[in-house]
Amino acid sequence: MKFSGLIFANLFRKKIRLLLTIGSFAVALFLFAFLAVVRDAFGRGADVAGADRLVIINRTSIINPIPLSYRDKILRIPGVKVITHNNWFGGVYQDEKNFFPQFVIDPENQRQVVPELIVPDDQWSDFLKDRQGAIVGARTAERFGWKIGQRIPLKTTLWGGGNWEFNLVGIYHGKRPQDDETQFWLQWDYFQEHVPERIKGQVGWYVLRLDSPDDAVRVAKAIDEEYANSPYETKTETESAFAAGWVKQFGNIQFLIATIGVVVFFTLLLVTGNTMAISVRERTSELAVFKAIGFSDRAVLFFVLAESLVIAVFGGLLGLVLAVLAVPVLTKALNGLLPNLVLAPRFLVLGLLVAVFVGLASGVLPGLGAMRLRIVNALRRV
Amino acid sequence: MIRVDGTGKSNSLIQVRGLDKTYRRGGEEIQVLQRLNLDVDKGDFVAFMGPSGSGKTTLLNLLGGLDVPTHGSITVAGDEITHMSGGKLTNWRARHVGFIFQMYNLIPVLTAFQNVELPLLLTKLSKSDRRKHAETALGVVGLAERMNHYPRQLSGGQEQRVAIARAIVADPTFLLCDEPTGDLDRKSADEIMDLIHRLVKEYGKTVLMVTHDPVVARQADLTLHLEKGLLVESAEQPQGVVAGGAA
């Protein structure tokens, strides 16, 4: 503690340089937090997926349908607890930029298969009673200012096209902050009434729950073998594998984000290392005086490391605080393009640890240089 | 008694025996000090003179444990420093040596008080004790009123006085002064020399000083010249000042 005054006095020697270095740490950590949040949002599907859920799609592609008739057969496979099915609706609300996912759901089993998305019982009961009923996630409802009882028109070019009208009867909430609250659910029966005859009785995909997650591999294999060589071959995988595959369609986002992160921190390491090296070189003779009057080599190393650490921690905290403030703004600006952006505490801790590491790493070489300084030579350099 | 013939008492404060220092420059060996002997007692004030490159500063660096000799030994208050490890030598310097440099070498971001307090940070003194010591040292050099000034707010002479306060604050065994007036005008130089003289006379400090200035050197008890790597007594030593310390 008695050296803290010394460390801070040295830090404030060049105020503009100090501000710029702290600023570069803040920007890097802000970027780190932002990338971590986006990466998390892309991987969210895999993270929030139920361990006991399987997704069945057409082996050719998810845009190819599967017959509804498969449902009962699949349900008879040992280990399958409950099954539901969905279709992608693909409607537009007023303007194409108002994107949010809309799913045709099977009201019978939806709540058993996806229990983490909670609909109040009275609203669910209204939904079952009204074939034109719709339930929407809280975020989408908030985004458009929708209230229960409101009539929602959606326009689609799929399923024979045209304008579809729905009665908003319920709003669901996720159990966890990371649950997707942007979906819009409409009823299978209403959907079936309106689609052309040739595509009636065809679902987009099935989602089933197992008695036990341990059955996943066996049940998936059994389903796919059951429909092998049929006109509608299936591909069954765990929900997390399905979600990960979905994200992969955007390209290797994880790798891209990780690469950007590494480049940012490597650049930061070089910038801070260079700043510390300049700072040490500028006060070579002062460091020699410290050593001459009895400060040990380790003490000199400690001073340099402490200075770079203080810069890193201050800059890092500043960047993370800015990220905490910016993420909600960003979530709004993205208009539901990504699921809820959540800056989890683990990202803050990780960010701070990375800042500490970069701070120490950038101070090591200049610090060792200062430590090895020969007093006699350094005193000559005035 | 200051002696250069290697026949000093065994209990001299500083005892140098057969000191050699050789530098290597571009494959060539340059011998700066050759078989040099020196004995300095407590309270002695000795000045070293000699042409540039004669090895004055090298000798001072060796005596202060900042450099190691090629051969020979240096014993200070019974401690042979020539074979001490780096860490031990650092601790030894903190306890025994007060350095005063030509360019003052104050830390510009610290106040006069903080500069003087620096050596005390290495001790176990409490904050209030450190403050007392630093204030006393600044009082001795006449700068108690300026303790909160930064070096840039002080004149050259005042900066050197702060440097002297820093050198004496931990009550070292001896002071090493490398051209302490070399960067000062005559008036300031005289003030600094009066101060150093006072430290010797009133506080019994032992001072070894390198200087180019004969006027400054005359303030010392004895002036030694470095010639061809050896110390010789000055022929111009004024009457009344003898090699035995205060006249």
Image (cartoon, coloured by chain):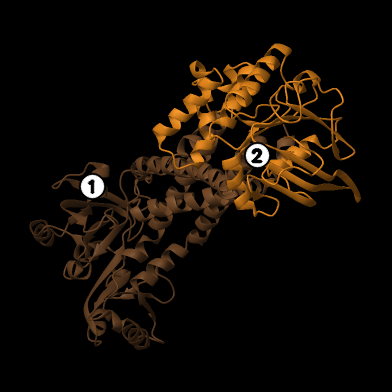
Chain colours: A brown, B orange
- Quarter assignment of residue A209: bottom left
Residue A252 image offset from top left, x and y in percent: 51, 62
Question: Toward the viewer: B241 or A314?
Answer: B241
Residue A221 image offset from top left, x and y in percent: 36, 86
Residue topped by disc 2? A288
Q: Is residue A68 above or below residue A79?
A: above
Q: Chain of mark 1?
A: A
Q: Is residue A196 in sight in this rendering?
A: no
Which-is-in-front pick, marks 2 and 1? 2
Question: Toward the viewer: B125 or A323?
Answer: B125
Disc 2 is placed on an element classified as helix
Quadrant containing the C terminus of chain A is top right
Residue topped by disc 1? A141
Kindly give the residue lying farthest to the right in the view shown.
Answer: B28
Question: Toward the viewer: A183 or B133?
Answer: B133
Q: Chain of mark 2?
A: A
> How far apart are labels 2 and 1 at the CA level?
67 Å
Residues at badges 2 and 1 in contact (C-beta under 8 Å)? no
Quadrant containing the N terminus of chain A is top left
Work out whether mark 2 precedes mark 1 in sequence or the reverse, and give the earlier one. Answer: 1
**Is A323 positioned to the left or the right of A305 in the image?**
left
Report the amino acid beneath label 1.
Answer: Ala
Look at 52% across and 53% down and name the residue there: A261
Tag 1: Cα neighbours inside 10 Å, few (<14), some, or many (≥20)?
A: many
Report the amino acid beneath label 2.
Answer: Ala
Disc 1 is placed on an element classified as helix
Look at 50% across and 29% down and name the residue there: B114
**Is A244 positioned to the left or the right of B52 in the image?**
left
**Is B166 positioned to the left or the right of A67 in the image?**
right
Residue A241 image offset from top left, x and y in percent: 39, 72
